[in-house]
Image (cartoon, rainbow, N blue to C red):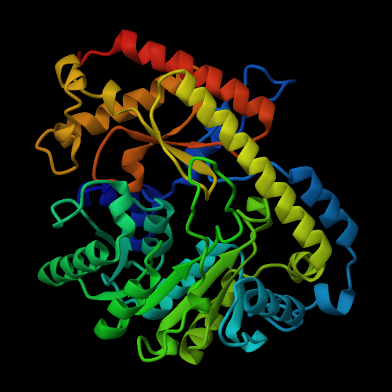
Amino acid sequence: METFNEEHVQAILHEHRLSIRGANNFFRDVWGPREKSMGNPWSPSNPNGTVILRLAENSLLHEEVSEFIISQMNVQPLEHLTYSTGPRGSRRLRRAAASFLTEAFHSREVITADNIIVTPGLASAIDALSWAICNDGDGILIPQPLYNGFNVDILNRSNAQVVGVTYEGIDGFSGLDDLFHPDITRIALEAALRRAKTEGIAVRALMPPETLRVFASFCGVNGLHFISDEIYANSVFSNPAIPSPVPFTSVLALDLRGVIDPVLMHVLYGASKDFCANGLRIGFACTKNEGIMGAMSSIGIFSWSPHVLQDVWAAMLEETHWLADFMLQKTNLMADHYSITTSFLSDNGIPFYETNAGLFIWVDLRHLLVSTSSRQQSDYSALRATSPDAHIYKQRELRMADICMENGVMIAPGHVYSPEEFGWFRITFTVRKDALEEGLKRLLLSIEDIRVESEWK
């Protein structure tokens, strides 16, 4: 995340009569600047709009979700127009969420409503959890590359910080696949923790993507909170290029007795990705830590999800036949759209990293970032984030994203996700088919423009 010096902060503080906290957060506003670019989306009736292939949104079943929500909108005055059970969440949703986690996530122990606290989306859950466990300046370990929203969720209110777990220089690390290797991961975690301590950062927690038992053991040994963000649990699809995929496994399904104290383990889940409903703003944290439940509840009144919407999501979880059909239809569509995208990329000689989960593809445009001679030798060593010229390649990435924007398609430059190498871009494939096809055409046009403009040949 971009930082601003004290002079900038003081100028905003005095101009707008803000607190120091308010002035700092003025520069942390990521949504205000996005409003203009996101307010004119492409559609067949708006051909001059922007095709948005940057956001982590699944739009494939919006109509089906809309119909279900409309069918469930039955306002109960005593439950929906009062404070009801308060900011921890409706009893109905907490029971439904507990049952869903127990069954669908194959939990080794029965989850109860008392283990669930409801939040308006996972950003709110991460914010509240960070606030509950971190002091000012404390850190949370997260393996890189990582979701850039963590910087906002962890920093803005709690004033905690992301401590990236880097893999470059770790013995045995050679590429992206090694991010999930248990031994390499263990070494990387230990190195990150030592680095944080040297920098005076007290690490309080770890948020992992894979290699779960290693993460849990590391947290147990070091007395850290283990936070498992499982928001993509049901966004796994079939990919013939990965014939023997590793299935999704929740930490709830693992036997971690003697590995980590259960009060240090927390699972996060939400409606945004798996239920094609980013705007529904419903999420929850599952924990056996009563202290965290109390701390999160104490600030819950500031981020209280309407109980009428909570009951809509509860209905989705309770309607098991609808839920099963929905998830099957969604993952089939995801596989189709992934195939459309990767076939397009392959046909046009654009490298990418194969996956079978999530809403986006990691596209390799490193060859467009380096000189012709380096490109011919496939030498991308200069693109490492530790390179003396890192700032140059960051600017080139930004320019490439700008060229795409000029051609009416938004994609995400990789550096915003803190990778260890420049030249990777994130492209969302879970948009409507007509928008996807239009966006890919504009991407190809943009790549041609990048080749023509390229000043770094």
Toward the viewer: 391 or 159? 391
Residue 414, quarter of the rendered image: top left
Image vertical order of residue 359 relative to residue 403, above or below: below
In this rendering, does residue 81 appear at all? Answer: no
Judged left or right of residue 50, residue 177 is: left
Q: Residue furthest front?
A: 243
Specify the quadrant that holds the C terminus.
top left
Image vertical order of residue 307 relative to residue 452, above or below: below
Image vertical order of residue 378 relative to residue 177, above or below: above
Count of numbered marks: 0
Percent x, y for residue 258? 36, 91
- The residue at the point 73 percent across, 69 percent down is 310
- The residue at the point 14 percent across, 70 percent down is 194
In this rendering, does residue 352 appear at all? Answer: yes
Residue 69, quarter of the rendered image: bottom right
Residue 205, quarter of the rendered image: bottom left
Percent x, y for residue 20? 32, 61
Judged left or right of residue 284, residue 85 is: right
- The residue at the point 31 percent across, 80 percent down is 217
Toward the viewer: 158 or 212? 212
Judged left or right of residue 2, residue 351 is: right
Percent x, y for residue 1? 31, 49
Toward the viewer: 201 or 335? 335
Toward the viewer: 48 or 178? 178
Judged left or right of residue 444, residue 83 is: right
Percent x, y for residue 284? 59, 71
- The residue at the point 55 percent across, 61 percent down is 231
Image vertical order of residue 413 relative to residue 171, above or below: above
